[in-house]
Image (spheres, rainbow, N blue to C red):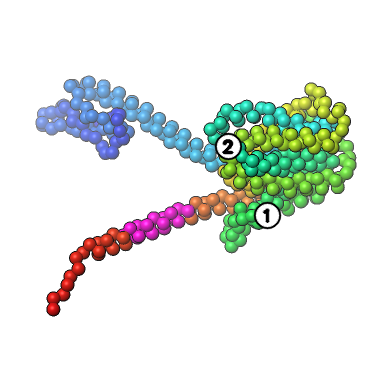
Amino acid sequence: MPLPVACCCSGRVESTAVIPMHASGAAAASGLQEPLVAHGLYKHRPLVPSSDAAFLLEAKKLLTHSVLFATAERAYIFEIMGGSMWMRYAPHNMMILVQLSYTLMYFVTEDAFNRGLNPYVYVTYRHLLVALLLCPFAYFHEKKLRPKMTLMLFLEIFVLSLLGVSLTLNMYFASLKYTSPTFVTAMANTVASITFAIAIVLRMEIVDVKSPRGLAKVAGTAVSFAGVTTMTFYKGAAIASPWKAPIHIHGSNAVHGSWVKGSLLAVASCVCWSIWYIMQAGSVERYPAELSLTAWMATVGGIQSAAFTVLLQHRKEDWLVGFGLNFWCIIYSGIACSGFAVFAQLWCTEKKGPVFVTMFNPVSTIMVAILAYFICGENLYVGSIIGGGVVILGMYMLLWGKDKDQEYNASSSKELQGSDLDWEKQAKMADVSSVQNDSQPETKTMT
């Protein structure tokens, strides 16, 4: 029987290598030589040992070497497959982490507001903190990637900071002071529908209502909005928490005043937020340094918010937060929400588009309801359970439509490239035939 051994090492094996082996036993008596077939990952010069024992020892070494190479190759292939799988679902995982950061922020911020923290001062401090942390790192990390700053680009960043930081967040957190975390998180889910509608008007989003993927996007947005409406306006029977709440939010049972005012502020902030998501898509293309763009928005937005606070709030005591819960609320919100979350949203917007980013907003609504029930001891209502399930259904319907759109666009681009190549081949063949016809001598008929 031929002995399989491994050969190493200068290149890939294209075919089976055969190494002559000294005859032994019956084969030697008959004058025949049994070939040694070398199966391996890498080819080597034919091995001709001086004796059978030395040959077997060398073959054992090569076989061990081949096993190591095969293991390394399988690990490399697994690493490549795992890396591609991670890159495919990295935007999904990033957006889930963003929503988790926002969920924790809602509870901490509500407690801080009930303890006297001014919403305008909160927005100002949290973004100035992010600017202080990100600016040095972004300056050195993206020094070669960052484009040259122009007046038009600065004006675009100014408007982007106004819509995404100072104006929007000041209205949003003012509405949180007047309403509740459940309400503002539910209202934030309307950003997906508003963004989707604006994207269609601006022709940034293509909807083919005759295809299943187009219907899924439209139906998913409508279903998600219906689920949010159910959670907001239909409570149903209450399901009391079976144990005592481990965390009690100060003033969480107090009746919020100016509910209409808070609702209007929440709606206005959602409209501004939708425009901000739309602007991100073009801004990231013109300013591809996401970390530097995040630092710019935090800096400009913090300065804008400070100007708003000076105009609207005239008490010096509002600027003193101390080192208690209010201080740590600003630290957490600045690093987790204004830093990581904004950077992750910019990155996901570049990879998947603005509608993909906004469709993850319902996740925070579900998380708020769950944490309010299990951690804060609040009642969980049947309407929240039904609405949460409907929201998740609508979100994944739209995400399915978005994924199918990407597959369709990728296949269409490949077909277009193939047709272009065929057209070029036909054009070249036509040129060659015309040249050949021109080069042939003209035949004159003799009369």
Q: Amino acid at mark 1?
A: Ala
Q: Is residue 109 visible?
A: no
In the image, residue 75 lies in the stretch drawn in magenta: no
Q: Residue at image x 60%, y 29%?
A: 139
Instruction: Say which mark, if any, is on residue 197.
Output: 1
Q: Is residue 29 left or right of residue 231?
A: left
Q: CA distance from mark 1 to mark 2?
A: 33 Å
Residue 246, position in %: x, y?
Answer: 79, 29
Q: Residue at image x 85%, y 34%?
A: 313
Instruction: Say which mark, if any, is on residue 148.
Output: 2
Outermost residue, front side: 151
Secondary structure at badge 2 equals loop
Which stretch is magenta? 413-429
Q: Nearer the viewer, residue 84 or 26?
A: 84
Q: Nearer the viewer, residue 46 or 405?
A: 405
Q: Residue at image x 72%, y 41%?
A: 162
Q: Quadrant of residue 3?
A: top left
Query: From the image, which quarter does the C terminus lie in?
Result: bottom left
Q: Residues within 10 Å of mark 2 (few under 14, many from 20)?
A: few
